[in-house]
């Protein structure tokens, strides 16, 4: 039996529609238009495509989009000055500095310089701490997207064993925190985990966020499990470049109960959740209630 395909594209479109309705309500009731500022340093082609998509969708849901393309040799001081300027700008409710930065060592400093109330990526230690303590800050977009897909697929997640592969600050750790908050039993695997296949096989839910093409095989999967494949990997196959996930889709989908495809699974959810977070941030900054979509 083939797994049910979790249609991230459709669910993301629905979420963007809900955000657009929230934005329209905010404008009508409070004369307020949420604004999202995206700062891109350098000309990384993948980041440029991502930033262009963000801009398009920000405008589509009725928000203001502010774009800053800075040269790769922008100094740390100049970048921090740009962040300070956006922190102080009342028309900007969300700030996103596109990662990776050309100088990786600046990343933590720049993330910490963003006002936590405008940190729509949810990477600031303040928001990471609120997530860990269950205090409801801004939640990182890709992990939030994973949670929405899981809840749409399975409903109540309580008591399920979730195995997260990967422990990065932007995906693995926050996904694990979100699942713990949903009362899952959570196992986190990483590059030093022993007998990872046996660990993954325990999962009713498997979230793969590794960055190794097709690493998770059919034999690793408990029959009927739900697989959320975060990986986006470019591979050459039969002379063509293809995108594949961290799970071997063809074989895993014969064992799993439900699975996200790559592309068209988690990817579209990330931008939709960014827009959701921007709406949430705008509402909070102006102390107004609005229908920010719960996970
Ligand atoms: P990182 O490289 O930051 O983290 C990868 C994690 O995988 C690390 O924790 C690492 O362990 C672990 N890992 C590496 N090798 C193995 C192994 N052999 N067995 C088990 N674990 C291993 O990646 P990200 O978290 O940033 O991204 C993961 C993937 O998700 C990438 O493909 C990325 O492109 C994709 N992604 C997709 C997004 C989307 O919108 N869909 C958004 C963000 C990322 P250790 O800590 O021990 O080194």
Image (cartoon, rainbow, N blue to C red):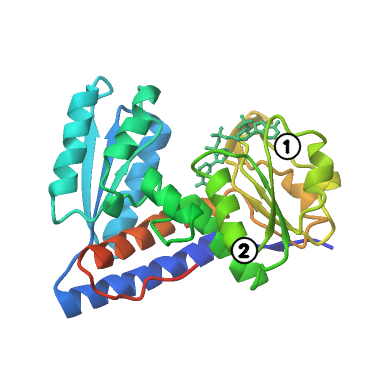
Ligand 1 contact, mark 1 (Cβ < 8 Å): yes
Position of residue 180 in the picture relative to residue 50 (left or right): right
Q: Earlier in the sequence, mark 2 or mark 1?
A: 2
Circle 2 Cα neighbour tier, 10 Å, few/some/many (<14 / 14–19 / ≥20): many
> Which x, y percent locates residue 58?
30, 57
- Tell me the mark number nearer the camera, choosing from 2 and 1: 2
* Residue 234 placement, left or right of 51: right
Which residue reaches farthest front? 133
Q: Position of residue 136 (x, y in %)?
A: 42, 62
- Give the side of residue 263 with respect to residue 227, left or right: left
Q: Residue at x 42, y 71 (%)?
A: 293
Return the residue nearer the eye: 89 or 239: 89
Q: Secondary structure at mark 1?
A: loop
Q: Residue beneath label 1, please?
A: 215
Q: Residue at x 76, y 48 (%)?
A: 250
Toward the bottom, the furthest residue is 29
Report which residue position mark 2 lands on.
Answer: 150
Instruction: For label 1, count other residues whose C-alpha is less than 10 Å away and answer few (under 14), some (14-19) or many (20+).
Output: some
Q: CA distance from mark 2 to mark 1?
A: 21 Å
- In the image, ligand 1 is in what quadrant? top right
Name the secondary structure under disc 2: helix
Residue 276 locus on image (x, y percent): 37, 62
């Amino acid at each position: 039996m083939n797994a049910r395909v979790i249609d991230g594209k459709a669910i993301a479109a629905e979420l963007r529609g809900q955000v657009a309705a929230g934005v329209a309500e905010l404008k009508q009731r409070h004369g307020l238009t949420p604004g999202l500022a995206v700062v891109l340093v350098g000309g990384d082609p993948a980041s440029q495509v991502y930033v262009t998509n963000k801009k398009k969708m920000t405008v589509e849901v009725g928000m203001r989009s502010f774009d800053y393309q800075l040269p790769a040799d922008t100094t740390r001081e100049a970048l921090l000055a740009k962040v300070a300027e956006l922190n102080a700008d009342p028309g900007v409710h969300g700030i996103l500095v596109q990662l990776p930065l050309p100088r990786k060592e600046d990343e933590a400093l720049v993330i910490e310089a963003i006002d936590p109330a405008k940190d729509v990526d949810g990477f600031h230690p303040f928001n990471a701490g609120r997530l860990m303590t269950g205090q409801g800050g801004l939640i990182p977009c890709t992990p939030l997207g994973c949670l929405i897909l899981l809840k749409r697929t399975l409903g109540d997640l309580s008591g399920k064993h979730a195995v997260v592969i990967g422990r990065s600050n932007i995906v693995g750790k926050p996904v694990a925190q979100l699942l713990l908050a949903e009362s899952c039993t959570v196992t986190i695997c990483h590059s030093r985990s022993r007998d990872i296949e046996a660990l993954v096989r325990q999962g009713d839910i498997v979230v793969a966020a590794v960055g190794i093409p097709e690493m998770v095989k059919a034999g690793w999967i408990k029959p009927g499990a739900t697989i959320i494949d975060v990986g986006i990997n470019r591979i050459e196959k039969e002379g063509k470049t293809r995108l594949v996930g961290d799970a071997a889709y063809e074989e895993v989908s014969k064992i799993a109960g439900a699975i996200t495809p790559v592309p068209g699974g988690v990817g579209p959810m990330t931008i939709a959740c960014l827009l959701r977070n921007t709406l949430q941030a705008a509402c909070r900054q102006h102390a107004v209630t609005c229908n920010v979509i719960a996970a």
